[in-house]
Amino acid sequence: MNAWSCVIPGKPRTKNRKHAVWRPGMKHARLIDHGPSKVAEENTRALMAMQKPAALFAGPVVQDVDFIFAIAESRRRDVKHRDGTVTKALQPGDLHDGRPDRGNLLKLLDDAMKGIIVGDDAQMADGRVRKLWGDIDETRVTVRAWERESVSHPAQTGEVSTTRDGAP
């Protein structure tokens, strides 16, 4: 098995953290897990299970992910402000630099893949993660087995300097 790809429809969701809640009269704080991320993870797992590969990936894998957020109609045209500045219209493929942050987006996806695509999310050793603007909300995932490249890294060949000043 070389590669596996999947498109997850809908707005990309994040992995929420549990929050401690304490109110007067309570002996101990309670951990609250907000439901939407659990539902999003379960839905993502179900979709991946329908398209899962014949066998789990073994060893390190490369994961490429594009989190795509739909451009609102109001953001599709240039806006001229009173002070004369212009906010350019967003185009599909432009980088999304707002919230949610990519780490939380990726955490939900990695956890959902565990046991369906890979044995453990620690296998995700390399890859590219992008947040983009697009026409529709979706997440595109490609996972492939890592292959050793013919070009070796300087650390593997002994060409790396071991001193701070760069001298061998």
Image (cartoon, helix red, strand yellow):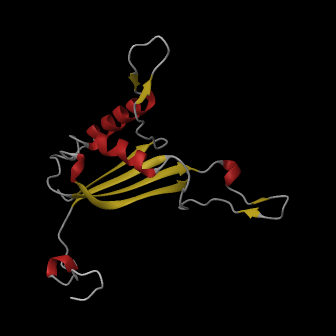
Q: Give the camera-side residue of 124 and 133.
A: 124
Q: Is residue 44 above or below residue 129?
A: above
Q: Indicate the quadrant where residue 39 lies.
A: top left
Residue at the spot 44% in from the left edge and 51% down from the top edge? 102
Q: Where is residue 60 shown, x and y percent of the image?
A: 19, 58
Q: Is residue 88 above or below residue 31?
A: below
Residue 122, image x, y percentages: 22, 50
Residue 125 found in image quarter: bottom left
For this orientation, the residue located farthest to the top is 25
Q: How many labels sit on residues?
A: 0
Q: Quadrant of the N terminus?
A: bottom left
Question: Quadrant of the image for the C terminus?
Answer: bottom left
89 versus 34 height, above or below: below
Most foreground residue, 31 or 25: 25
Q: Kindly give the residue lying farthest to the bottom in the view shown.
A: 167
**In the rendered image of this protein, does residue 161 appear above or below residue 26?**
below
Query: Which residue is depicted at the point 20% across and 74% down?
Result: 149
Could you tell me residue 90's position as x and y percent?
A: 63, 59
Q: Is residue 129 left or right of residue 4?
A: right
Nearer the observer, 29 or 60: 29
Q: Position of residue 153 (x, y in %)?
A: 21, 77
Instruction: Say left or right for 158 vs 36.
Output: left
